[in-house]
Amino acid sequence: MTHPLHDIVLPDDRTEFFPVVVEIPKGSKLKYELDKKTGLLMLDRVLFSSVHYPANYGFIPQTHAGDGDPLDVLVLMQEPVYPLTIVRARAIGGFFMRDDQGEDDKIVAVAVDDPSVAHYRHHSELPPHLVKELLRFFRDYKILENKLTEVEEMYDRERALKVIEGAVAGYRAKSGWNKG
């Protein structure tokens, strides 16, 4: 069986696109997590707050982020996609956050195969209210669990690409994660 974290190949040049494995569809209140041992999705929880994921949410394969998980990505596109779907995405920005699970980055990307968003190259091109919604979701989604989150303002595409390369290097430094 193919493991979504280890077996999906990254392109050598990740500036134009990279694969994202979607864990959570846009509009969902279900928080799925990849089980690193089996490669299956596990329901972590149903969100406590009256919020839903504002974009398809997943990770870049063969990455290791600051929180010990693969690097998180919000993929902007018109439609929600099924969990474990691979979407070709391009980074346009990101933001840094802290919560009870640690510190990590969230990359903001667009689906390169969705004509409604494929033209975006930088987060500053997005509708301002959409950017506010993305950041607000992560500021609010754990409030009713009595857990605090700190979310910094969105950063640019160049920093996002550096974060991605750092996460790829982190994965490779670990010689890949042990599947079992």
Image (cartoon, rainbow, N blue to C red):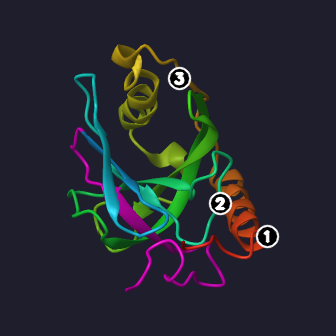
Location of residue 69 (image quadrant): bottom right
Q: What residue type is labelled 3?
A: Thr
Location of residue 31 (image quadrant): top left
Marks 3 and 1: in contact by CB < 8 Å? Answer: no
Gap between marks 2 and 3 measured at Cα:
21 Å
**What crowding class fits label 2: few (fewer than 14 Cα within 10 Å), some (14-19), or many (20 or more)?**
many
Q: Name the residue under label 3.
A: 149
Q: What residue type is labelled 1?
A: Ala
36 in relation to 10, above or below: above
Q: Name the residue under label 1.
A: 173
Q: Residue at x 56, y 27 (%)?
A: 100
Mark before the other along the chain sequence, 2 or 3: 2
Q: Residue at x 66, y 84 (%)?
A: 12
96 in relation to 93, above or below: above
Mark before the other along the chain sequence, 1 or 3: 3
Marks 2 and 1: in contact by CB < 8 Å? Answer: yes
Residue 88 picture location, percent across and down: 41, 74
Kind of element beneath mark 3: loop
Q: Which amino acid does label 2 sit on?
A: His
**What crowding class fits label 3: few (fewer than 14 Cα within 10 Å), some (14-19), or many (20 or more)?**
some
Tell me where the magenta segment starts and ends, as one range.
1-29
Please give the label number shown on residue 18. Answer: none
